[in-house]
Amino acid sequence: MRRAAFAVAAGAMAVSLAACGSAKESGGGSAKASGSAKKGDAIKVGLLLPENQTARYEKFDRPMIEKKVKELTNGKGQVVYANAKQDASLQNQQVDTMITNKVDVLIVDAVDAAAIKNSVQKAKDQGIPVVAYDRLAQGPIDAYTSFDNETVGKTQGEALLKALGSKAKSGKIVMMNGSSTDPNAAQFKKGAHEVLDGKVNVGKEYDTKEWKPENANSNMEGAISALGKNNLVGVYSANDGMAGGIITALKAAGISNIPVTGQDAELAGVQRIVSGEQYMSVYKPYAPEAAAAAEMAVDLAQGKPLSVAKDKVDSPTTKQVPSVLVPVTALTKDNIKDTVVKDGVYTIPDICTAQYKAACDKIGLK
């Protein structure tokens, strides 16, 4: 089944090139690896991912990038991998190790976008180009791929409003944002506020340390205590992992049937949507994102133009970064079959285990 998820990469790239959102259109990227001669297929790609608590990184991003690099280099390219386990200092050390190991290019999903800046500069000083993956790292990055993050927040906010309907201002909602060290979290929050402000009453709002479900759970317990369980009408959760912690707190307080949002279409999140515990998630197709990162990394390592990067975005430190932004979809119980199942991310047996079979049958997921 996992192989099926990989197979969508090539086809989905056509979607990714549409590059939606707030990025500025460009005439096509032409950045090249600085100071390095053109290389053949025997390149070494350093891949640094930020943590292993969110299911996507080990199950999807890493194997997809590894597979695409192999495809683009006729099996000769090597991916050297490290996971920072949510430790920004460790990730900086990992960059140093990658430099020592003389990688030809780095793909970096930063734990802390600001804290990685000096390490990005170190790599650049050694002639190693850097692709910022999923999060817009600071420093002299050469390319970037992610999703339109404000659109993600807007998608979540719009879904929450739809679920609340006429009850939108009848009580309080809680906003459980992501980590303050993640620039994506700020963009999700901004997009959500653009949709929700003036249309709901925000009773409590949190920036959740390290995106951890247990921290979201603790925050939610505090919100319930402060606001009263009878006054809650919904929860904006920035991702599925935190939604799990939030829903655990809601259940413990005897609260049910209020909409909770999410993001990442994690299997547990999809199953909660099937059962009705979670209202929605944001489906972000990882295949085109991973494929874009691999293609840009290989191009940079080989000194080729970045033909895949049709957009440009600005970071706090670098302007007009060649970029690929991938569209997203609101995932609800109504379109599970047309999204994660159709794209081969999960099979129906993956989702509809014995615990969820009755709920799957009820919504026609067979």
Image (cartoon, rainbow, N blue to C red):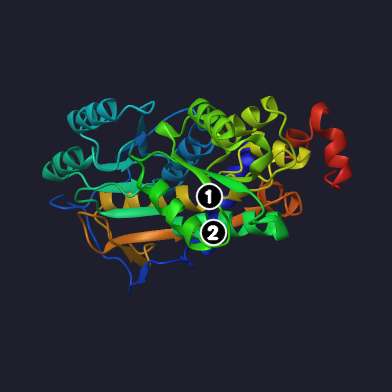
From the viewer's perspective, is residue 310 above or below residue 129?
A: below
In three-dimensional space, the C-alpha distance between marks 1 and 2, rounded to whole angstroms, equals 9 Å
Tag in front: 1 or 2: 1
- What amino acid is found at the position of numbered circle 1 in the picture? Val
The disc, 1 or 2, on the residue closer to the chain's N-terminal end is 2
Quarter occupied by residue 270: top right
| Marks 1 and 2 in Cβ contact (< 8 Å) | yes
From the viewer's perspective, is residue 234 above or below residue 32?
A: above
Residue 135: x %, y % from top left: 37, 47
- What amino acid is found at the position of numbered circle 2 in the picture? Leu
Residue 343: x %, y % from top left: 65, 50
Residue 202's disc number: 1
Q: In the picture, which quadrant includes the C terminus?
A: top right
In this picture, residue 109 sits left or right of residue 343: left
Q: Is residue 352 visible?
A: yes
Closer-to-camera residue (293/141): 141
Q: Tell me the element at label 1.
A: strand
Residue 320's disc number: none
From the viewer's perspective, is residue 74 above or below residue 316?
A: above
Quarter occupied by residue 231: top right
Name the residue beneath numbered marker 2.
196
Q: Tell me the element at label 2.
A: helix
